[in-house]
Image (cartoon, rainbow, N blue to C red):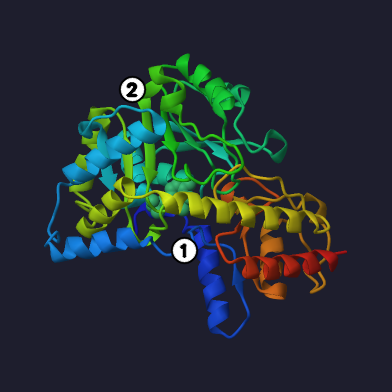
Amino acid sequence: MAFLSDRMARIKPSPTIAMTTRAAELRAEGRDIISLSAGEPDFDTPANIREAAKSAIDAGQTRYTAVDGTASLKQAICAKFQRENGLDYDPAQITVGTGGKQILFNALMATLDEGDEVIIPAPYWVSYPDMVLLAGGTPVIVECSLEQGFRLTPEALEAAITPRTKWLILNSPSNPSGAAYDRDQMKALTDILMRHPDIWILSDDIYEHLVFDDFRFVTPAQVEPALKDRVLTMNGVSKAYAMTGWRIGYGAAPTPLIKAMAKLQSQSTSNPCSISQYAAEAALTGPQDYIHDSRAVFQRRRDLVVAGLNDCRGIDCPTPQGAFYVYPSIKDLIGKTSAGGTTITDDEAFANALLTETGVAVVFGAAFGLSPHFRISYATSDAQLSDAIARIQSFCKGCS
Ligand SMILES: Cc1ncc(COP(=O)(O)O)c(C=O)c1O
């Protein structure tokens, strides 16, 4: 009898974490490495949020809380949905977990049976397919090319639906492409879903606040209120308030799903960290200046990175609407050989050669289900970004 379960054979470790670890190892060996592989803001958590956490400790808020979040945090989340998304939820329709990741995990574990299908547009966030597989479901990947703006079309959605489809996962703005759906594009998808009453929609809104230029963020339950009773709207404080380490995410959905998710959480992690919950409440109810300030910084960096990459021979980098990633194509570099002698057979070979020859760590597109691309996270300083772009430019110049 094998010691490890069959379940473990279905999944792989996160490729983005693997790349970040590899970059850290090379740095520890003394190499000059620029890591553009991590998906987290490089800013500190705002001071008012840190203060709220310290006060929570001093006030003795250090015990177990209700399994899926304190009453006051759930109230703050309801107010957030009302204020920012025009969505009315009551606290019984809210769940809080250890990061948005746990909300997704709970929802899939609570609803998927063997053979249930989940439609996942590619490029996708690396954890979606593996979470579906862990829960016993079947990921149905729909490739959304650069030419389509990396967005799912209504035709492709319709074609992917079968009698086994249980969920569609939407992530706007997207990790890894930064692509986002405007109201019309979202409505075109919700119109299809209105004709398929058994399909639920999991909307991962974690990058909601990182949208640029005049782009207006929308979420499915807001665009089509008639779908609200089969939407799980997931969000969290990690990316919006530079709180990745605090581990607070939340979801809003019909009460029976919320109850099932809480039951699961009660038998796994119990409540998310009590202190982090008080910090998240301060984030949602306090001043929102950080969101505006960080958005301006990320927009400037996006423009720097897109312009620099489009100056690289063989790279085509579209301008994303949001998040802090770009997802350029390296189609024109496939088959070429780098100055260091590596044949660029695919995007993994490209990312490995780039790391070895220039010290720039990026994540290859195959990890996100759409090749030949790579992902850069520009959540790092302008100086690091300029240095990285110069190295990528010289790497591309050396390819023949
Ligand atoms: C698309 C997407 N969803 C969810 C998450 C999870 O965020 P967290 O668990 O930190 O709240 C991430 C983090 O990288 C993400 O990129």
Quick one: which residue is furthest to the right in this view? 400
**Can you give x and y, in whole percent of width and height, for residue 178 in the image?**
59, 45
The residue positioned 60% from the left and 41% from the top of the image is: 179
The residue positioned 61% from the left and 34% from the top of the image is: 151
Q: Is residue 163 above or below residue 100?
A: above
Quadrant holding the N terminus: bottom left
The residue positioned 78% from the left and 65% from the top of the image is: 393
- Between disc 1 and disc 2, whose residue precedes? 1
Graded by Cα atoms within 10 Å as few (under 14), some (14 to 19) or many (20 or more), the crowding at tag 2 reads few
The residue positioned 63% from the left and 70% from the top of the image is: 384
Q: Which SS class for mark 1?
A: loop
Mark 2 sits on what residue?
229
Q: Is residue 361 above or below residue 151?
A: below
Quadrant holding the C terminus: bottom right
Q: Nearer the viewer, residue 370 or 193?
A: 193
**Can you give x and y, in whole percent of width and height, for residue 139 in the image?**
49, 38
Graded by Cα atoms within 10 Å as few (under 14), some (14 to 19) or many (20 or more), the crowding at tag 1 reads some
Name the kind of residue labelled 1 in the image: Phe
Mark 1 or 2: in front is 1
Residue 23 in which image quadrant: bottom right
Q: Is residue 172 left or right of residue 225?
A: right
Q: Nearer the viewer, residue 245 or 343?
A: 245
Mark 1 sits on what residue?
43
On the question of residue 139 being in view, the answer is yes
> Cβ–Cβ below 8 Å for labels 1 and 2?
no
